Image (cartoon, helix red, strand yellow):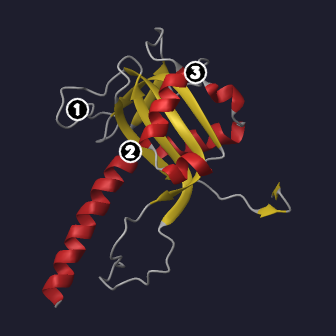
Amino acid sequence: MNKKVLIISVILALIIGVCGFVAVSAHTSPNVVSPTSSSQKYSSNNDMQEFYRGIGDFSIEIKAADKTPTLTEEEAIEIAKKHARRRIRNEAKSITAMYVKLTDRPGGKNSPALILPGTNIVMEDIPVWIVTFHGADILYVGPGLMLNSKGEHIAPNVDPYVYGDLNVVIDANTGDVLEGFSYNIPKPCWKNDTVF
C-alpha cells in the first residue's frame, strides 16, 4: 500500500511540476512595456497591473514590437478562444490582447531562451499576441484523485479551480499557439452587483 501511495505521489509531483513549469517560470525583464497596439485601452488599469504582477515571477521578457503583425488582434483573440476552456471563455470578465516581442527564459534572466519542444522555435524576441482572459475560474487540479503533501486523499469537495487570468501566447505571423500561462488574482467581492 505504501508503495502505491509513493508511486501516485511521484506521478502527481511530476504532473504538478510540469504544470508549474508551464505556469510559472522566473523573472520579468526590467524593460517591460505597455504596447500601444492592443485592446488594453479597453481594459482597466487594474487588469494590466494584475498582468504585470502576475508575470513578475515568470522568466518572460516583454518588449515593444516594431513591425506590423500578419495576424490581426481580432484573429488572435478568436484563436485564443478556441484554445481556452469553455468555462474560461464564458466567465472571463474581459479579454484583452497585446502585441509585443516575447522572450521566455525558464532558467532565469541569464539563461538561454526556451526552445519549444518538438520544434526549432527559439522563444527569443518572437513577435506575439498575448491574449488574456481576465478574471475566470481556472482549473488548477485535473479531474481524478487529489492528494495532499503527505500523500493522503483529499475530499472531492475541494474546489479544483483558482480565480485568475489565463494568457495564450500566439505567434503574430503564423497564428500558432506557442505557450500559455496563468496566475491567480484576488477574487472581487460582490454585493448587490457592486464590487468591493
**Which numbered dot is residue 49?**
none
Which tag, 3 or 1, sits closer to the chain's start?
3
CA gap between label 2 and label 1 equals 16 Å
Q: Give residue 3's quadrant in the image.
A: bottom left
Q: Which residue is mark 1?
A: 115
Left/right of residue 34 with respect to residue 196 in the rendered view: left
Which tag, 3 or 2, sits closer to the chain's start?
2
Name the image quarter holding the N terminus.
bottom left
Q: Give residue 106's quadrant in the image.
A: top left
Left/right of residue 91 with respect to residue 166 in the rendered view: right
Q: Amino acid at mark 2?
A: Ala
- Residues at marks 3 and 2 touching, judged by CB atoms closer than 8 Å: no
Q: Which residue is mark 3?
A: 35
Bin the neighbour count of mark 1 within 10 Å (Cα to Cα): few under 14, some 14-19, many 20 and up. some
Residue 90, above or below 118? below
Q: Amino acid at mark 1?
A: Ile
CA gap between label 3 and label 1 equals 25 Å
